[in-house]
Amino acid sequence: MVTNFIFFGDNSVGIGFLISHLLTIFFFLYCLSQFYQKTKLYSTIKFEKNLFRVGLVLRIISILFFYSLYYIQTGTEFDPTAVDALWYHDTGVQIAQQFSELRFNKEELDRIDFDDLGYNLYLGVVYFIFGPNVIIARIIQGIFGSLSSILIYRIGKSLFNENVGRTAAALFLFFPMLIYFTALHFKETLMVYFTLLNIYAVINFQIKKNKVKYLALFLLTIFITFSFRAVLTYTLLASFFLSLLFTKKIKLHQKIAFTISSVFVLLIFVWQVGILDEFSGKLIKYFDRSTEGAIMANTAERMANSGQTFAKFASGPVMLVQSVSFPYPSMVKTNIRLFDVADQWYYIGSLFLWSFLSYWAILGIYDSIKTRIKQNLPLLIFTVFFSIILVITLYITSIRFNVLKMVPMLIFVAVGLDNNTSKRLKYWYPYMIWMCIVILIWNYAKVAGRGMI
């Protein structure tokens, strides 16, 4: 951070931002250590209760702090770079008004497809019950965030062991970016919850006897996630069917029956609610590159023209090698919008932490593949597939899109830490030094690509 500030001079983020993020890193490490030590002897029930309570308190504090900060900065409840957030809010107000008239008409809403409707509906329900109260909506998001830490714990415990589950939950609980997102009008907090709930349902579907219950939960979360982001739904579907194919705990005739029945029920359901054409149309856009608006046809040139100038230097192999450690913290004055602030500045501390923790994620993925690959397929397939999609579309450089990659990878971070050795720890230090060099190169490319130096 000091090198960045000295080298880039006037093009560097201000010293106040850098100091606040340095303190954020220290706060994360301190809370992580204290929480882990104080709860290591807790029973499962007591540990989960503490996860929820501590998580909710932290998130409410974050919500109130940033709510006050935004009012000082912008005179509104929204952050200085709010664009999507304001649209979500306005659409939520419209939906709440429709609900108050005992009706709902999607056609009256502005530029909205079904796969972007979920968060607007959430806001509409909250605003209908409590009025257009931004704080209440964010506090409820905080509840979802706290519940997600419990799901992380249960997934890690089911796939690996108690220690992995608790470490992953603690990492999630205090990770600054995830706390910050609850203070924004963004859909990522809810998407994380329903993604983890889906993975949890798939894991329990394979190991528990009450398969109908978990199959129903899987299909419900599939429908919900499609209302947030289509590609997320397709990734979860692929994860389910591929993990089902390779599991030994379910007989072949049951695999065939479950596959046919789940596909049939899903198709009937999306047909009945009138989104079958949109469901299939979105899928085509991801696979047919010749289709107008094809998402997989996203190119480095297109992204560079939209302002992400680093994309000029990007290629598939380059991005794939770095896909685990991406995105890197941006500490230069690029992508500035209103109020002379860029949204990327709020994530500097979190992305430093992720750059360093990615070392353990890589080792954790390696350990998972080497020792328990079939058992871990629901988590592995989702993480790998979603990362590949981010690389192909070059959304790997987007912080918001990476949240759904980073959260399940926190479990792999915990696996890597659980299998720590003196040799592995020894190589972590040069890895962190290398990451610092890469981060400086990244920031230089952002500035140089815009001709600022």
Image (spheres, rainbow, N blue to C red):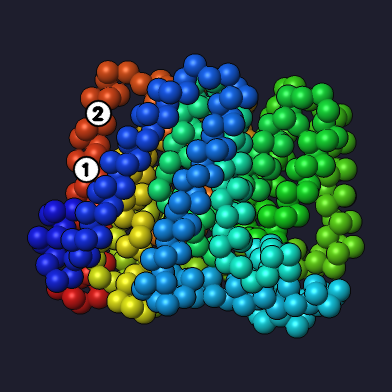
State left or right for residue 46 relative to residue 35. right
- Specify which label sits upstream in the sequence, 2 or 1: 2
Which residue bears the numbered disc 1? 434
In the foreground, 406 or 234: 406
In the displayed structure, 215 sits above or below 374; it is below
Q: Which quadrant of the figure has residue 248?
A: top right
The Cα atoms of the two marked residues, 2 and 1, are separated by: 11 Å
Return the residue at label 2. Answer: 427
User: Residue at the spot x=33%, y=78% of the render?
Assistant: 339
Residue 352, x across and y down, in percent: 30, 48
From the viewer's perspective, is residue 294 above or below residue 324? below
Mark 1 belongs to which amino acid?
Trp
Query: What is the three-letter code of the residue carrying label 2?
Result: Tyr
Identify which residue is drawn at 70% across, 78% down: 94
Q: In the displayed structure, does residue 227 sit left or right of residue 136?
A: right
Q: Is residue 59 above or below residue 65?
A: above
Q: Secondary structure at mark 1?
A: helix
Between 95 and 196, the residue placed more toward the observer is 95
